[in-house]
Amino acid sequence: MQQISLAYPANIEVQHDDGTYYFVNFRDVKNCFTQGDTWEEAYINAQDVLGFMLQDYVADKVELPKPSTALKNEILIEPLPEIAAPLLLYLARTSMHISQVQAAKKLGVTKQRYANIEHGKNLTMKTLSKAAKAIGFKTTLSLVATSS
């Protein structure tokens, strides 16, 4: 069973030059880095910048880098769900070599409606599940505790 992930390893390090802040960089995604005043802010900013970078790859028709396994000093970070969901749908469709027209036909919608779904416009969990099923995938959902 093929599984698609947008969880990329990142390193969050505390920096002390010009004050204290947390710097984040992704080794698999070139020029993808950010920072925050706190660890939590850096993490959220990392989700944002990763999502924007991956969207740029898709817009520029550049293949997304494959996420590697996190090293000892790294954590896995995914884009925010509202960015990740349409990106995952796009990756699933293209991995199956299905055009948007073909996906729309399988889903029973117009090509324009399917394109909007893949861009996250009016994308509900129900629509995501139906679209994924139409192209041969199923959706899964998980929640991860941010503190103990």
Image: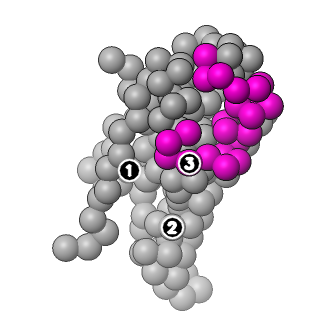
Q: Are marks 2 and 3 in contact (CB under 8 Å)?
A: no
**Quadrant including the N terminus:** top left
Are the residues tagged 1 and 2 within 8 Å (C-beta)?
A: no
Residue 112 versus residue 108 in the image, above or below: below
Q: Residue at x 62, y 57 (%)?
A: 49
Q: Earlier in the sequence, mark 2 or mark 3?
A: 2
Q: Is residue 111 highlighted in magenta?
A: yes
Which one is in front, 98 or 8? 98
Q: Amino acid at mark 1?
A: Leu
- Relative image position of residue 53 (x, y in whole percent): 66, 47
Please identify, in this view, whether the residue under mark 3 or under mark 1 is nearer the observer.
3
| Whether residue 16 is visible | no
Residue at left 53%, top 61%? 46
Q: Is residue 35 left or right of residue 119?
A: left
* Residue beneath disc 3: 124
- How far apart, in angstroms, are the residues tagged by discs 3 and 1? 25 Å
> Depth-wise, is mark 2 or mark 3 nearer the camera?
3
Span shown in magenta: 106-127
Quadrant of image for the C terminus: bottom left
| 7 in magenta | no
Quadrant of residue 19 within the rendered picture: bottom right
Residue at x-position 56% and y-position 48%: 124
Horizontal and vertical percent position of residue 48: 59, 60
Amino acid carrying label 2: it is: Ile
Question: SS at mark 1?
Answer: strand
> What amino acid is labelled 3 in the image?
Thr
Real-space CA distance between mark 2 and mark 3, rounded to the nearest whole angstrom: 22 Å
Location of mark 1 (residue) = 76
Disc 2, SS? helix
